[in-house]
Amino acid sequence: MNLIVAITGATGVVLGTRLLEILGDLDDVKSYLILSEWGARLIESEVGASIAEVSKMADFMYDNDDLEAPVSSGSFSIDGMVIIPCTMHTMASIALGFSNDLISRAASVTLKEGRKLVLVVRETPLSPIHLRNMMTLSQAGAVILPPVLTFYHNPQGIDDLVDHIVGRVFEQFQIDHDLYSRWGSKEGGRQAGE
Ligand SMILES: Cc1cc2nc3c(=O)[nH]c(=O)nc-3n(C[C@H](O)[C@H](O)[C@H](O)COP(=O)(O)O)c2cc1C
């Protein structure tokens, strides 16, 4: 599988770096990384990692202003794209069809080619403009997957909450994982017919 991974400048960039870290261990998934300028800045301030370190986790990496990159074209063989986290700025740009940087261009191409686009949109609270853009993109076929807190899997800390979101993204692409205990996966309950 060939997956475009974009990280934009919303808080929670650890979601993107964790996803890349796990993808790096999977032989059958190739990652194509694009960082927005603010995504890169937040990686340095929130994760404390250098861009050189993060780029090593990906199979390929492109500059966000490199509109000649392979992932800019629908003819390049890509299975899907995730933007994790996705800012309101990038979401608005995709919803309007701007395509003025590689992230929004690749997202636009992903949609027009009928491939899966997952947006881990992060903002709170949400204005009507944000909600309208989410609706536009959902109707265009994107999956809106906000990184909301979840407790049914009994998280022991932030790492478990991060892994839960990364796991939910992987499920969108049918990537196997054991990042959290799925609901109903534990022993218990009655067998049908009991
Ligand atoms: C520390 C910090 C946290 C931010 N968090 C968010 C956020 O959670 N969601 C959001 O939409 N924008 C957030 N922003 C604002 C974006 O970084 C800003 O809108 C930027 O233009 C986004 O550009 P990009 O989409 O190209 O990354 C944050 C900015 C800073 C400095």
Image (tube, rainbow, N blue to C red):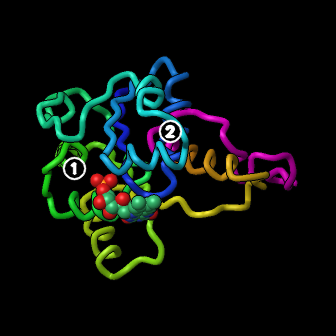
Tell me the kind of residue under disc 1: Ser
Q: Which residue is drawn at 28% across and 62% down?
A: 89
Report the span colored magenta: 169-194
From what the image shows, is residue 193 above or below residue 88? above
Tell me the kind of residue under disc 2: Thr
The dot on residue 117 is none
> Tag 1, which secondary structure?
helix
> Tag 2, which secondary structure?
helix
Observer able to see residue 194: yes
Q: Could you tell whether 185 is left or right of 149 in the image?
A: right
Residue lying furthest bottom in this view? Answer: 128
Closest to the observer, 24 or 137: 24
The dot on residue 17 is 2
Report if residue 185 lies within the magenta region. Answer: yes
Residue 70: x and y, percent?
Answer: 18, 28
The dot on residue 104 is 1
Q: Could you tell whether 57 is left or right of 180 in the image?
A: left
Q: Do the residues labelled 1 and 2 touch (CB within 8 Å)?
A: no
From what the image shows, is residue 85 above or below residue 69? below
Residue 112: x and y, percent?
Answer: 17, 48
Mark 2, ligand 1, within 8 Å: the answer is no
Closest to the observer, 95 or 90: 90
State the separation of the CA atoms marked 1 and 2: 19 Å
Q: Could you tell whether 133 is left or right of 5 in the image?
A: left
Report the magenta stretch's main SS: loop
Residue 125: x and y, percent?
Answer: 46, 77
Image quarter (top left, top right, bottom left or bottom right) of the N terminus: top left
Image quarter (top left, top right, bottom left or bottom right) of the C terminus: bottom right
Q: Residue at x 13, y 57 (%)?
A: 98
